[in-house]
Structure formats: C-alpha cells, structure tokens
Image: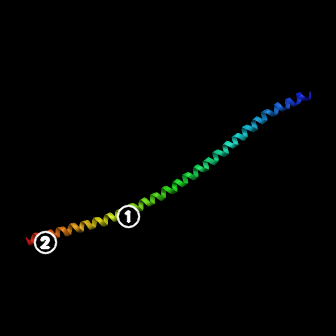
Amino acid sequence: MNFEEKHKEWKAEALERQLEKAAEEFLKKDKKAKEENVGVYKEVEKFRVETSRAMEELGSAVDSGLAESRKLGADAKMKKIEAIAIQAKRSRIW
C-alpha cells in the first residue's frame, strides 16, 4: 500500500513538475527575448547617431563645395572679363 500511495503522489506531482518546467522555459525565452530587444535598441540608437553624424558631415562638405564652386566661378568670370578686355584692346590696336 505504501508503494501505491507514493505512486499516486508522484503522478500528481508529475503534472506540477511539467508545469514548472514549462514555466521555466517560458521565463528563459522571455529573458532572452528581452536581452535581444535591448541589443536591438542599442544597435538602432547607434545607427541613428552615426546617421546624424554622417548627415552633418555631408552638409558641411556640400556647403564647403558650394563655397569653393562660387569662388572658382567668380575667378572664371573675372578671367572671361579680362580676356574680353584684352581682346577689345587688341581690336583697337589693329
């Protein structure tokens, strides 16, 4: 009889053990998912910082390029004006 009682008790506890095991697995998976989400959030934030820095660098590069272009454009205009003035002087001399 002692064996039968222990067997019944063991069977009753088997369901409880199974539920505990399922709960532990769920908690492990949930913890792992949360850790992965934290990693993803960190990667997204890192990407945002890098993107904003790159956009700032791009903006300053474009601004400096445009300034240089304007400067070269002004120099080219002056050279054209000087060339026209020289041509006009030559035409008067001939």
Q: Is residue 59 above or below residue 44?
A: below
Q: Amino acid at mark 1?
A: Ser
82 shown above or below 33 = below
Q: Residue at x 85, y 32 (%)?
A: 9
Whole-percent x, y for residue 10 in the image: 83, 32
Point out which mark residue 64 bears.
1
Find the residue positioned furthest to the right: 1
Q: Earlier in the sequence, mark 1 or mark 2?
A: 1
Where in the figure is residue 38, as x and y percent of width and height?
Answer: 61, 50
Where residue 71 sits in the image (x, y, percent)?
Answer: 31, 67
Query: Which image quarter: residue 18?
Result: top right
**For the point 41% across and 60% down, which residue is it?**
59
- Left or right: where 11 falls relative to 26: right
Q: Residue at x 38, y 60 (%)?
A: 62
- Say which residue appears at 67% left-offset and 46% top-offset: 31
**Residue 89 bears which disc, if any?**
2
Label 2 SS: helix
Spatial separation of the CA atoms under disc 1 and disc 2: 37 Å
Q: Secondary structure at mark 1?
A: helix
The image shows a total of numbered marks equal to 2
Location of residue 70 in the rendering, given as x and y in whole percent from the top left corner: 31, 65
Q: Furthest-left residue in view? A: 94
The amino acid beneath tag 2 is Lys
Q: Quadrant of the C terminus?
A: bottom left
Determine crowd level at label 2: few under 14, some 14-19, many 20+ residues with C-alpha closer than 10 A. few
Left or right of 47, for residue 59: left
Quadrant (top left/top right/bottom left/bottom right) for the N terminus = top right
On screen, residue 60 versus residue 28, left or right, reads left
Is disc 1 in contact with disc 2, using a CB cutoff of under 8 Å? Answer: no
Local packing at callout 1 (Cα closer than 10 Å; few below 14, some 14-19, many 20+) is few
Quadrant in which residue 64 is drawn: bottom left
* Relative height, residue 73 to residue 20 (above, below): below
